[in-house]
Image (cartoon, rainbow, N blue to C red):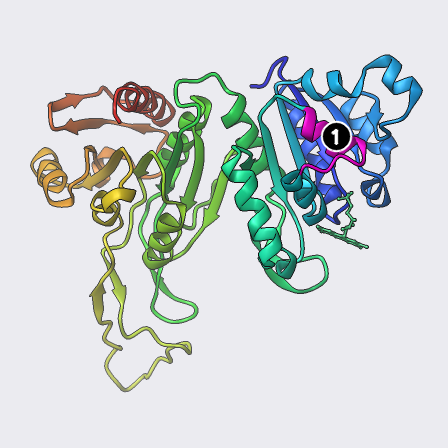
Amino acid sequence: MLDGRRVLLVISGGIAAYKSLELIRRLKDRGADIRCVMTANAQNFVTPLAVQTLSGNKVFADTFSLTDEHEIGHITLARDCDLVVVAPATANLLAKMAHGLADDLASTALLVTDKPILVAPAMNFRMWGHPATRANMATLKERGVHAVGPNAGMLAEGESGLGRMAEPAEILAAVEGLLSSGPLRGLKALVTSGPTFEPIDPVRFIGNRSSGKQGHAIASALARLGAEVTLITGPVKLPDPPDMKVVHVETAREMLGAALGCLPVDIAVCAAAVADWTVSNASKEKRKKDPNGPPPAIELAANPDILATLSEKGSARPRLVVGFAAETENLLTHARAKLERKGCDWIVANDVSPSSGTFGSDFNTVHLITQGGVEDWPRIAKADVAERLAWKIADSVKGKP
Ligand SMILES: Cc1cc2nc3c(=O)[nH]c(=O)nc-3n(C[C@H](O)[C@H](O)[C@H](O)COP(=O)(O)O)c2cc1C
């Protein structure tokens, strides 16, 4: 929650300004107090009235308004907050920030503030890739300005590429990460969850029964403790948890690519039930049934090992790597062997035999295996397993370099 936390939201003149309305709503829902500054160009995209109505506060736009300056000086406005968020951050405003220009209220506030700044860049992919913008972002990051996004995808002009503003939920997660007072504040975590689907052909696949409930609950618990979480999920029926970046994947290879794309992180929890094998003779077209012939043979090849890869990632290795072992027999023996084989720090072992009712259920019975031994946890709700694990993680990484 952001109860009582004060956010100064600077809205600049990009097409994504409409999403800042949703951001205001979400920040307010979390209990934050929002003041907004709009550039003159931002007002071409959303009206100050809409921003004022949603934020519940007067909107500031003019450095030289005698009334505003009388009510709250521009210096107080820029400092009387816990965090300054710029969303969307245009290429123009990022350039002004990098070069110390102060020719309107937004850029002046950004130059005079003594509070942390989070920018959510949004622009055409060529603007984002331009050496000038790259250099400006590098300067800002070097000065400690935080950034969320941009994401790849379809841009407003119909082109696609890197430049879409991060979704309001992702910006909110970054805000909470910066403002939260939880023990994992300032740390990044990646969590994998759900099954992977390995295609046989465009309509059929090999999957498994993982519901994603445990992995999603762990991602939420880590976020509640203040971590900036990226959840990489296979196909599940669950809604995306709020307050974090969620990446949807289907295959093990896609999951590995997304996980490597998140590095560096401080914590990695691999709770996904990743398929061990992929179909090496997957067909590009739907396989046809031959009534007279034998059924088609499916050939399997080993999938990449996400847990082992993250555990051995050299200097980019997360400080703590936690794997899951889902077994149907000899649970602890298999789980201990997995800890050694994969080189991870902890294994959470759970029995997924049909009689355990673990898959899809809201409850789980797990054993936490570390180098120090085994902890047997009672059967508790998956949400409670997640909470308990998140606190264990917080205790462990606090002392770790
Ligand atoms: C329809 C339209 C959409 C625009 N979208 C963006 C955008 O998404 N990102 C960006 O950096 N500039 C965008 N621009 C250009 C900015 O509006 C322009 O650089 C302006 O000077 C930014 O002013 P500000 O940074 O003071 O708000 C757009 C311009 C137009 C006309």
In the image: residue 324, left or right of residue 285: left
Q: Which residue: 61% across, 52% down?
A: 133
Label 1 crowd (10 A; few <14 / some 14-19 / many >=20): some
Instruction: Report the magenta stretch's main SS.
Output: helix
Q: Residue furthest bottom?
A: 292
Q: Which of the pair 287/385 is nearer the observer?
A: 385
Q: Position of residue 57 (x, y in %)?
A: 80, 20
Please state if 239 lies on the left or on the right of 97 as rendered. left
Q: Quadrant of the C terminus?
A: top left
Name the residue located 83 percent from the left edge and 26 percent from the top edge.
Answer: 59
Query: Does 367 sit above or below residue 288?
Result: above
Quarter-wise, where is residue 376 in the image?
Answer: top left
Residue at left 92%, top 18%? 67
Regarding residue 240, the answer to whether it shows in the image is no
Horizontal and vertical percent position of residue 275: 27, 54
Q: Which amino acid, mark 1?
A: Thr
Up/down of 120 relative to 196, above or below: above
* 236 displayed left or right of 69: left
**Does dot 1 land on a helix, a strand or a loop?**
helix
* Magenta stretch: includes residue 198: no
Would you identify the image quadrant in which residue 32 lies?
top right
Q: Quadrant of the N terminus?
A: top right
Q: Quadrant of residue 226?
A: top left
Residue assigned mark 1: 108
Q: Which residues are magenta?
A: 100-112
x%, y% of residue 168?
Answer: 62, 38
Q: Is residue 109 magenta?
A: yes
Q: Nearer the viewer, residue 218 or 51?
A: 51
